[in-house]
Image (cartoon, grey):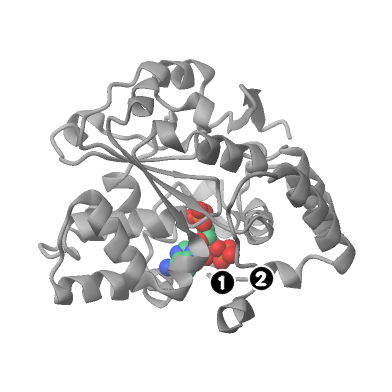
Amino acid sequence: DPNLFRYKEFCFHSMLHTKEHIETLQDFKIKHDDVFLVTYPKSGTIWTQHILSLICSEGYRNGTEETTTDTRIPWLETKSPDIHVDWTKYAEISPRLFTTHLSYSLIPQELKTKKGKVIYVVRNPKDVAASFYHFYNIFVHLKKPANFDEFMERFLAGDVVAGLWFDHVQGWYSHKDEFNVLFLKYEDMIMDLCSIVQKICKFLGRELDETTLNTVVEKASFKNMKMDTRANGEHLPGQFFNENKARFMRKGTIGDWKNLMTVAQSEQFDAIFKEKMKGLPIIFTWDISEQYS
Ligand code: A3P
């Protein structure tokens, strides 16, 4: 894909990132109360951004709705004239919240000394691939896949934004002891969002009363976020998207990969998964029906 460039096993978008900026992030100064939301793309990033900004504003109690997601939780690695983050204004906010897709090896060094907190969200990779495929079809500046078959080949070769899913997850999980980190699963968020919000609050050392907790859970529901123009990215420059509009809230379910993958593709995926994930004790929910089993 001519829109991407590789740097240290990672795939960056040339419109949003520069190698020089990524290199400077190695020395990024961390504050003790910094929180980094880390994900591989399509794993529930915006959802978790939304939850974090809701928690930190106590359910937007003071009508701070406009300062949500990418304003309140900017992208660490993005450096683009189209998407500008006013870091000076941001410096006064506490705690600082950042979002990043960076791999373990590209993350600021200081974070590896347990200074600051990391929330890593992981999603079953078949749904990630399915969600990513749809994203590739709405984002103008990415090489449109001819079909899912071709996209899956690229995904399994790591020839997509953020590189290989397996490397990303392996990198973060196998170095977990270097971080002050909370691992979350997208599927657990789907199945019991309230418990996950409580878990995040505990990790951040914040207490919400019951009403506020319920407000956070309600405002972070798929139904509500689907109607939210900011969560959908509709404020982003229209020229980036087909039909001049982003639509990030798509289906928000577990197991949508079944609508795209053939049995043969799924088996090929399983074989690679088994090989690459050897030694990592993450148990994924691949299908919504599993929650009842
Ligand atoms: P689908 O394409 O499978 O619907 P990211 O923000 O990392 O790009 O992840 C996007 C995925 O998260 C999309 O998945 C999107 O629908 C899903 N998502 C976003 N908000 C959600 C919510 N409140 N509940 C469930 N899924 C959500």
- Disc 1 CB within 8 Å of nearest ligand 1 atom: yes
Frontmost of labels 2 and 1 is 2
Q: Residue at x 54, y 31 (%)?
A: 15
- Quarter residue 29 falls in: top left
Ligand 1 closer than 8 Å to label 2 CB: yes
The quadrant of the image that shows the C terminus is bottom right
Mark 1: which secondary structure? loop
* Proximity of marks 2 and 1: CB atoms separated by less than 8 Å: yes
- The residue beneath circle 1 is 251
> Label 1 crowding class (10 Å Cα cut-off): few <14, some 14-19, many 20+?
few
Compared to 208, does 39 lie above or below? above
Foreground: 181 or 208? 181
Residue 101 vs residue 125, the one in the foreground: 125
Q: Please give left or right for residue 254 compared with residue 276 in the image.
A: left
Figure check: 255 above or below 144: below
What residue sits 61% from the left and 22% below the top?
7
Q: Is residue 55 visible?
A: yes
User: How far across and down, in percent of the image, does residue 10 sit?
Assistant: 61, 30
User: What's under tag 2, amino acid-wise?
Assistant: Asp
Q: Earlier in the sequence, mark 2 or mark 1?
A: 1
Read off the residue under disc 2: 256
